[in-house]
Amino acid sequence: MNEEMLFTLVQTARAGTLQTAKKVQSEYADFADVIPEGFKNNVRWNLGHIATVPDQLANYPAGEKPELAKPFHQSFANGTSPKDWSDETPSLEEIIQALEEQPAKLKEKFAGRLSEPLPKPFSLVGVEFKTVGDLLAFNLYHEGLHAGQINTMLRQAK
């Protein structure tokens, strides 16, 4: 896959996520922090997680500093829970802003570098990733997975 296509797909996936996030903001704001029966997290957590994971996946293995503020990582990284949130947990508005800005920031930082080898290979879900491009491609799957969770939760809210 060429670089232009990968960044186009990142932007396309994110546009879908943002459409859903803005629908949550306007139509389901009261539901955003409810953990529905059968789920471990809520809609806001999933949206924050969608923003946090590419920040972790693209930056840490490449030896770069993350772009998102520490409260994103404390609230939305793997293994976190809304039950442990603090006053510093980013709001839905802050999450939407991060989601809007992130694709351009990733492209600015990593354009021309997608094939660069990581300082050391990074393993996740039994797959060894060797470049930032590998990690960004994986994130397309990850974002879709959580976008699906959000859509399932919203159907349950109706």
Image (cartoon, helix red, strand yellow):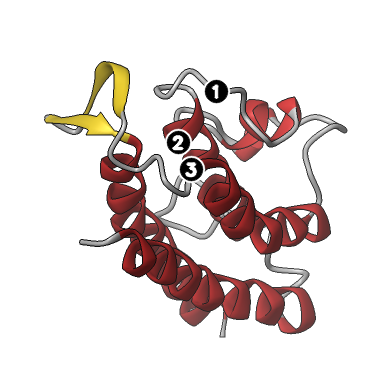
Give the residue drawn at x 50%, y 29%: 59
* Of the two numbered discs 3 and 1 in the rendering, the one whose residue sits closer to the viewer: 3
Assess disc 3: are there few (<14), some (14-19) or many (≥20) residues with their C-alpha within 10 Å of its C-alpha.
many
Q: Where is residue 32 in the image (x, y as percent from the top left)?
A: 68, 63
Task: Tell me which numbered mark, 3 or 2, is placed earlier along the sequence.
Answer: 2
Q: Mark 2 points at which residue?
A: 58
Q: Where is residue 25 in the image (x, y as percent from the top left)?
A: 76, 74
- Name the side, left or right, on which 93 lies relative to 85: right
Q: Where is residue 103 in the image (x, y as percent from the top left)?
A: 57, 58
Give the residue drawn at x 57%, y 42%: 109
Label disc, if present, on residue 64 of the rendered structure? 1
Distance from the alpha carbon under mark 3 to that under mark 2: 9 Å
Q: What element carries label 3?
A: helix
Foreground of the two, 56 or 5: 5
Distance from the alpha carbon under mark 3 to that under mark 1: 10 Å
Please state which amino acid type lies under the numbered disc 3.
Answer: Phe
Q: Position of residue 154 (x, y in %)?
A: 53, 76
- Look at the numbered discs 3 and 2 and tell me whether their residues touch, using CB distance below 8 Å: yes
Please state which amino acid type lies under the numbered disc 2.
Answer: Ala
Task: Tell me which numbered mark, 1 or 2, is placed earlier along the sequence.
Answer: 2
- Look at the numbered discs 1 and 2 and tell me whether their residues touch, using CB distance below 8 Å: yes
Label disc, if present, on residue 110 of the rendered structure? 3
**Quick check: 154 above or below 10?**
below
Label disc, if present, on residue 34 of the rendered structure? none
Among the 4 quarters of the image, the one containing residue 65: top right
* Of the two numbered discs 3 and 2 in the rendering, the one whose residue sits closer to the viewer: 3
Assess disc 2: are there few (<14), some (14-19) or many (≥20) residues with their C-alpha within 10 Å of its C-alpha.
many
Please state which amino acid type lies under the numbered disc 1.
Answer: Glu
